[in-house]
Amino acid sequence: MACLATGAMILLSFMSAVGVCFGAVYKVGDSKGWTNETNVDYKVWSSNSTFFVGDTFFFQYDYKSNDVMEVSREDFESCNVRSPLNLYSSGRDSITMWKPGHYYYVCSFPGHCQAGQKVDIRVLIQPLNPTPSPSPSPLNPPTSSPSPSPSSTLPSTPSYQTTHPPSPSPSTSIPATPEVQPPHFSMPGADQAPAPSKNTAPTSFLPSKGLLSLHLMMAVGFLAYY
């Protein structure tokens, strides 16, 4: 990542240097060139353009009657030509600006600066990343419908109830087996036998013993049957 960042910085610096080296070229005075004619206003010419570091200014003139002298701001305002910073006299001079700031040029021939043959060139730093203009926002932005919540889309899971047969209660009592009663046999005339009287003779006791024996035999026979 560090190598990529370093490479990007080197590439950006190289592109900036290329942009500076190949800046715009301006002809001072346009078609009129550098002259002492009164119909040329160099102040208006310089204010109509924005100049950056790397731009080149081309002075074209008649070298026999004109020249290009760079002076300070004070000498520019007073048209003092006795303290030049630079002097050009070829008639076709190209000056490239390598630093931002104000550059002042006059013609040193007598009376030319007073006639208006002077120019103030302001040079700015070339912006590396010009700020793009913001795009207009839409007048009626589309409204997005709210997305359904996950709880509303999932169907509810039906509940199943398992029915179990009721278990018998521990307290349920088992029906008791009915007790089998032995059949009762009655002999004819036995129930109608009159009870012996207190005054009955001992001889009347024999029939009662016979009846008791009969009942006992019937009971034994019933038990033997079951």
Image (cartoon, rainbow, N blue to C red):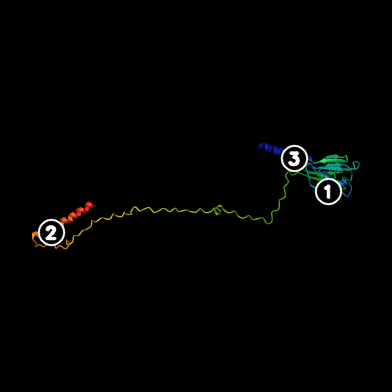
The answer to which of 163 and 126 lies nearer the viewer is 163
Image point 17% across, 56% down: which residue? 214
* Classed neighbour count for the residue bearing mark 3: other residues with Cα under 10 Å, few (<14), some (14–19), many (≥20): few
Image point 77% across, 41% down: which residue? 20
- Image position, residue 66 (x, y; %): 89, 43
Measure the C-alpha gap from mark 3 to mark 1: 30 Å
The answer to which of 113 and 123 lies nearer the viewer is 123
> For mark 3, what is the residue?
15
Label for residue 207? 2
- Image position, residue 73 (x, y; %): 81, 44
Label for residue 45? 1
**Which numbered disc, 2 or 1, marks the residue that appears first in the sequence?**
1
* Classed neighbour count for the residue bearing mark 2: other residues with Cα under 10 Å, few (<14), some (14–19), many (≥20): few
The answer to which of 117 and 14 lies nearer the viewer is 14
The amino acid type found where label 1 is placed reads Trp
**Which numbered disc, 3 or 1, marks the residue that appears first in the sequence?**
3
Left or right: 155, with 192 as reference point: right
The answer to which of 199 and 50 lies nearer the viewer is 199
Total count of labels: 3
Q: Which numbered disc, 3 or 1, marks the residue closer to the eye?
A: 3
Q: In which quarter of the image is residue 5?
A: top right
Q: Is mark 1 on a helix, strand or loop?
A: helix
- Image position, residue 130 (x, y; %): 73, 46
The amino acid type found where label 3 is placed reads Met
Left or right: 132, with 90 as reference point: left
* Contact? badges 3 and 1 (CB < 8 Å): no
The amino acid type found where label 2 is placed reads Pro
Q: What element carries label 3?
A: helix
